[in-house]
Amino acid sequence: MTTFTASWPVLHAVAGAVWKDDPTRIALAVLGVAFGVALGVAVHLINFSAAAEFDRAVRSLSGEANALVRGPRSGFPDAVYARITRLAGVRAASPAVEAEAQVAGHRESIKVLGIDALRAAVVQPHLLPDDRAAVLELLKGGTVILSHAAAAHFGLGAAATLRLHVGSGFVALRVAAVLPAGATQQRIAIMDIADAQWRLDRLGEIHRIDVLLAPGMDVTRFREAASRMLPPGVIIASPGAEAQRNASMARAYRVNLQMLALVALMTGAFLVFSTQFLALLRRRTQLALLRVVGLTRGRLTRLLVAEGCAVGVLGSALGLGLGIGIARLAIERLGGDLGAGYFRAVTPELTLDALTLAGYVALGVLFSAAGAAVAALEAARRRPALALRAGDEEAALRRLRSGFPGIALIVAGLGVSLGPPLAELPVFGYAAIALILLGAILAMPRLSELVLALLPRVRYVPASLAAAQLQATPRQAAISVAAIVASFSLMVSMVIMTASFRASLERWLDRMLPADLYVRAGRLGDTGYFTIDEQQRLTALPVVADALFGRTQNVMLREDRPAITLLARPFANGHPRPELPVRGSGMTPLPEGPPGAWLSEVAADLLGVRVGDTLELPVGHARRTFVVAGIWRDYARQNGSIVIDRALYIALTGDERANEGALYLDSGVSFEEAARRVRAAFPPDAGLEIASTRELKEISLGVFDRTFAVTYALEAAAVLIGLFGVSASFSAQALARRREFGVLRHIGMRRREIASMLGCEGLIVGALGVGAGVAVGWLVSVILIHVVNRQSFHWSMDMDIPWTLLGALGACLLGAASVTAIVSGRRAMSTDMVRAVREDW
C-alpha cells in the first residue's frame, strides 16, 4: 500500500484513460454544466449592468445633490422650492420640471428636463455645456440642449429641430448644443425651466428639487425639517435611494430569472452525477483492481471527486465565456430589461462583476463535485470482491431502491411552498421547487421498478428483449429516466406557466378592450392629452355612438416604492364599468361615506389592504380618504394601480384633460372610416395614436413575448440539457454492455435487430421520463403560478395547460431518446465482438 500510495502518476493515468476512452460522455457533462453556468452568468450580468447603468443615470441627473425632493407626474406647486431654500443646512437647490415626451417621427420617447441654469451650475454642472453662448440660448427659450445619447439616437445635431408631442400637437425646439458623451448616458433634452413650464403646459408646477446640503447636514435631519412643509404625495430621498426605488420595479423579474438559471445549473449538476454514476458502473472492475492493489477508499473517493471537479472547471470556464457573450447579445438586442419595458430610456453597457462571476464559476465546480461525490462514495463503499464479479451493476444500485426519501422530499416541498415571502421574495417557493425536483429524482428508481414490471409481453423479439433488459436492470434505467425528468419537468413547468400567463392575458385584454376604436394623444410619454374641447369634438363625430375618456396620473405613497398609477375612469352608477375585471363581488360605497377606490392586486398587496379598508391618497395636492371597494386584476402596471371615478377626480383636481379615449362606433361603420374621421377632426400634425382592439391585443401580446424571451431561452436550454442527459446515459450504458451485444451477435442477432432493441429501450425509458416529467412539471408549475408568481408580481392567473405543445415536445424527446440509444449502441457494436465477449473471462 505504501508503494501504491506514492504512485500518483498511476492514478492520473487511470483518470486520463477514462477521458480518452469516452470523451463524448465527458463532453456532454461539460456542456451540461456550461449551460447552467452560462444562463446564471448571462442573467446576472444583464441585471447587474442595467441596475448599474440606472444608478449612474439617476446620479448623473442629481449631480452633487445629497437629497432629492420628488413629486408625482402631476407635479407639485413651485412655491415649495422657495420654502426648501430657506431651510437651515441647504447650500443650494435646483428645481426642475421633468416629463417624458414622444419625439415626432419616432416611436421612442425622450426625457425632458427643465432646469434653472443658474442653480444647476452649482448642483448639476455637467448638465450644462462649456459653451456659454449655448447656455444663453437656452435662457432665451425655444431651445434645448441634447445629451450625446439622445443626439445619436434621434440623429440630431446642433441647430437641428426637435419636435416633441405635447397635448394633441407638437412643440418645435432648436438644438442649441450637444453635451459630451461622458455627461450622461440617458436620452434627455434640457430646457430652461420657465420655458418648459410654458411649452409643456406645466405652469406653476415642478417635479423635483435637487438639494445640495451644507457640510455636516445629513439627509435624515433635512428630511425631518422639510417633510413638514411638503404637500401630500411628495417624498424626500437620497439619490441612491431614488435609484433603488426605481430599480425595484424590475427586482422580482430579475430574481426570478436568476432562480430559474440556478435551477438549470442544478439540472446540469445532476447530469454530471448521472454520467459519473453510469461510468463508474462500467469502470467498476478497474476501480476494484485498484482497491485490491492497495488504494484506500479515501483516495479513491478523492480521485473520482477530482474527475467531477475537472468537469466542473471545464464546464464553468466554457459557461463563463458563453454567458458573457449571451449577456452582450441580449443587451444589444433586448436592452437592459430583457424586453420587459422597465428601463426604456436606459441603454446599459456590459459591466463585469468579477466577484459574482467567480461565484458562479465556483458554483459550477461545487455542483459538479457534489454530483461526482455521490457516485464516488457509492463506488468506494463497494467491496472489491463483489465489484470484480460480472453482472454486479444492478447490485451496486441497491441503495437506490427505496422511494421513501424521494416521497418525503416531495411532501416537504409542498409544505414549504406554503411559507410566506421573505423580503418580498418567494424564497420558500423556490426552496419547494428544489425539494420537489430532488425528491422526484430520488423516487425514480423505485417508480421505474414498479412501472417496468408492468410492461406487457410482445411477440416482436427486439422489443421483448428490450423490456426484459429494463426489467432486469430497473435502477440503471432509472438514472436515464431521472436525467429526463430533471430537465423535462423544468421545461414543462415553464411552458405551463408562460402559457397560463399568456392565456390569462388574452382573456384580460378581451375584457379590458370592449370598444371598437381607441385613440390616444401620443403613444408614449406623459405630455400628450386631449382638452375638454377635443373630447367633445370626438364625441360629436357622426360615426361615434359613444365615447369614454380616461386620465392617467400617479400617486407617491412611499419613498422606497415606485409611484402607483392612478386611473380616473368613467363610472356607471357609482361603480366601474363592467370591463374592469374585478375579483369577487366587492362592495358598494355608502353615499355618506368615503368614495370608492378599486385597487389592483399589486396595489392591494403592497399597501396591505383588503375590501372594506380605508386608505388616504394624495389627490389634488391634498390627502383624500377612500374606501377599498374592490380588487381587480391588472397585468399592465406592475407598480400597482388604483381606479377612481373620473367625475370625482375632476371635482378634486379641476383637471379635465384626458390621455386616451375609447370610441364605440355606429353599426356598420368600419374602423378605417372611423379613423379617417378622427384624424380629420384634428390638425394634420396632431400626434394621434389610433388603434383597433385587434391591434392593441397584438401589441400587448408582442410585449409579453419579448418580456418572456429569456424564459423561452431557459426552456430551450432545459430541452438541450435533457437531451445531453439522455445521450450521456445511453452512451455510458451501451459501452458498458459491449459484452452483452457480443453474446447476442454470437447467437445470431443481426446488428439491425440489436439497434431495434436499443431503440425500443430508448422509447420505453423516454416514455417513462416524459410521463414522470409531465407530472413533476405540472406540480412545479402550480408552485410557480400560485406561489412564486403571486409573491413576486402580486397578480393572479388561471392555469392553462397547452396539451398540444406538451405532446409535441414529449414526442420530440421520445424520438431523441430512441435515436440516441440506437446511435450509442452502434458505437458500442463497432468494437470487435469476440474481444468484447472475452472481457468477461
Image: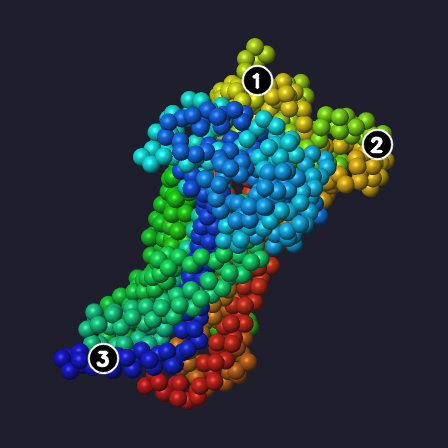
Q: Furthest-front residue in view?
A: 133
> The disc labelled 1 sits on which kind of residue?
Pro
Secondary element at tag 1: loop
Q: Residue at x 66, y 50 (%)?
A: 159
Q: Furthest-left residue in view?
A: 2
Q: Which quarter of the image is occupied by the C terminus?
A: bottom left
Q: Whole-Å distance between the Cαs marked 1 and 3?
A: 82 Å
Question: Which residue lies under the disc numbered 2?
Answer: 543
- Is the residue under label 3 in contact with that under label 2 (CB below 8 Å)? no
User: Is residue 476 shown left or right of residue 804?
Assistant: left
Between discs 1 and 2, the one toward the N terminus:
2
Circle on res. 595 = 1
Q: Whole-Å distance between the Cαs marked 1 and 2?
A: 35 Å
Q: How is the image coloured?
A: rainbow
573 vs 549: above or below: above
x, y (%) of residue 57?
Answer: 49, 46
x, y (%) of residue 466?
Answer: 48, 71
**In front here: 543 or 165?**
165
Q: Residue at x 35, y 61 (%)?
A: 358
Q: Is residue 465 visible?
A: yes
Residue 523 is drawn in which quadrant? top right
85 vs 501: above or below: above
Circle on res. 8 = 3
